[in-house]
Amino acid sequence: MSMQIGIVGKPNVGKSTFFNAATEAHAEIANYPFTTIDANHGVMYVGKPCPCRDFNVTCTPHNSKCINGTRFVPIEAIDVAGLVPDAHKGRGLGNKFLDDLRQAHALIHIVDASGSTDAEGKPCPPGTYNPIKDVEFLEKEITYWMNGIIKKNWENIARRCELEGKKIENMLAEKLTGLGVKEEQIHNGLRTLNLDYNKPSKWTDEQLLELSSYIRKHSKPMLIAFNKCDIASDNINIQIEELRKKGYIVVPTSAEAELALSNASKKGLIKYKPGSNDFEILKKTELTDKQLKALEYIKTHVLQKYGSTGVQKCIEEAVKMLKLIVVYPVEDETHLTDKNGRILPDAYFMKQGSTAKDLAYKVHTDLGEHFIRAIDARTHRIIGADHILKDGDVIRIIADK
């Protein structure tokens, strides 16, 4: 299954704008709740140094793209319906939202940093709503949703575990398998919360809720995109600091600015690379006064103030949060080509700690099953099945035909 990042938040905070800016897609953007009813799927790109520079070659990417030595590697994004309080009870589009989140490996939570949308996602005067409340509310909704799944037939499960000597983490993992929850995460939760493995029937509702919270935190790690940062009050830095002290990754973001720059760049009006802190105007005569003012505003209120629009940084941070590295498989380690002669064609995300054999399976099941050895193209050394891969490795896999 490919890695998937969920774009989440209450209605009206700029989720679809962020999604469009991050994926170059065109989900409907409108200023009213529930514009997004069906989840939008798209592809975001993570910028990594391309090995083409190290090897002094011109690459011919196949599953990714290379811009001036930066390889943009695809990762799937899903933009889901806006979440409102009590969504776990089915309020609003709650059930739909939570169902769409099942396969997300990490979440980017879009929060309206300007405080101009209330708890329900309705417009309100800027600064009248505390955006930190949104962080607490969204976590609570997902925790309660997971808790509801765990508690279904809980007495039967607990009893079976005690009578038949089954491991409670196995049974819970089976129950939560559709949510991408791993048995190891449940096991760590039981140990951290000091729950009695042998007596699950004695666990209280509070303990089950704590376990749900632990599982949510570790199976769906979340970063905060503090959106509309250009119109936020002076309190924004205090609020960011407050969230960071609680352990959150917070990125000041202006999805609208990124979308504007992306569109201008596509039309050839400006030169701009996602994640940059500046842009160059190429066709000044083709821009209206209004467009020039808008670009100047973005430069002074977003890029110079925050270092970037934040959209690309959110994607990069989400990948770091997932502990992913990028590896480049090739069929000829001397020329760095595949069977079609393409140079450094593919870039794959792998979990930190993945082995050469894991990469073989990722490329093709047959390669994994008939793995003999691999070759590191940088050192030309032979490496074994259990060799741990590093970020940026270029690897040839040799398999028994």
Image: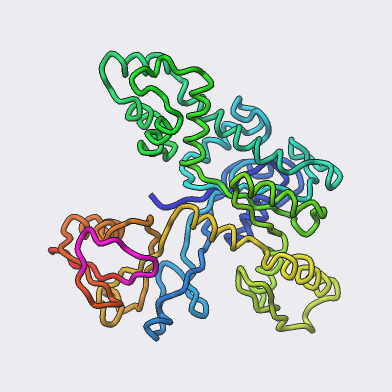
> Where's residue 262, x and y in %?
65, 68
Question: In which quadrant of the rendered view does residue 155 lie?
Answer: top left
Question: In which quadrant of the rendered view does residue 358 lie?
Answer: bottom left
> Where's residue 251, x and y in %?
64, 56
State the residue in front, 46 or 36. 46
Q: Residue furthest bottom?
A: 56
Give the main secondary structure of the magenta stretch.
Answer: loop
Q: Residue furthest left?
A: 400
> Where's residue 385, x and y in %?
21, 60
Q: Coloured how?
A: rainbow
Q: Which residues are magenta?
A: 383-394
State the residue in front, 335 or 351. 351
Task: Please determine whether, in this image, residue 45 is positioned above or below residue 106.
Answer: below
Circle count? 0
State the residue in front, 84 or 37. 84
> Where's residue 316, x and y in %?
53, 61
State the residue in front, 138 or 241. 241
Q: Residue at x 36, y 38 (%)?
A: 184
Residue 388 on the magenta segment: yes
Q: Residue at x 22, y 57 (%)?
A: 368
Task: Please determine whether, in this image, residue 334 is positioned above or below residue 113.
Answer: below
Q: Residue at x 48, y 79 (%)?
A: 69
**Left or right of 277, for residue 321:** left
Residue 378 on the magenta segment: no
Quarter of the image with the C terminus is bottom left
Q: Residue at x 69, y 72 (%)?
A: 264
